[in-house]
Image: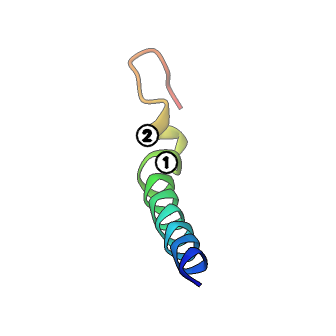
Amino acid sequence: MKAFLAGLVAAVAIAIAAAVVLDTEVQRSAADHFQTESVRL
C-alpha cells in the first residue's frame, strides 16, 4: 500500500510539473517563439 501511494504521489507531481512546463515554455505563439530581428511573421 505504501508503494502504491508513493507512486501515486510521484505521478501527480510529474503531471503537475509537465503541465507547468508546457504552459510556460512550449506552448507559445509563433510570433513569440521566433521573435528575432531577422524573422518577420
* Front position in the image: 10 or 24: 10
Vertical placement of residue 33 versus 13, above or below: above
Label 2: how many Cα within 10 Å (few below 14, some 14–19, many 20+): few
Rendering quarter of residue 17? bottom left
- The residue at 54%/40% (across/down) is 30
- Element type at mark 2: helix
Q: Amino acid at mark 1?
A: Arg
* Front position in the image: 9 or 3: 3
* Residue identified by numbered label 1: 28
- The residue at 49%/30% (across/down) is 34
Q: Amino acid at mark 2?
A: Asp
Vertical placement of residue 11 versus 38, above or below: below
| Residue 4 location (% of width, % of height) | 61, 78
Cα gap from disc 2 to disc 1, whole angstroms: 6 Å
| Residue 29 location (% of width, % of height) | 51, 47
The outermost residue toward the front is 2
Q: Tag on residue 32?
A: 2
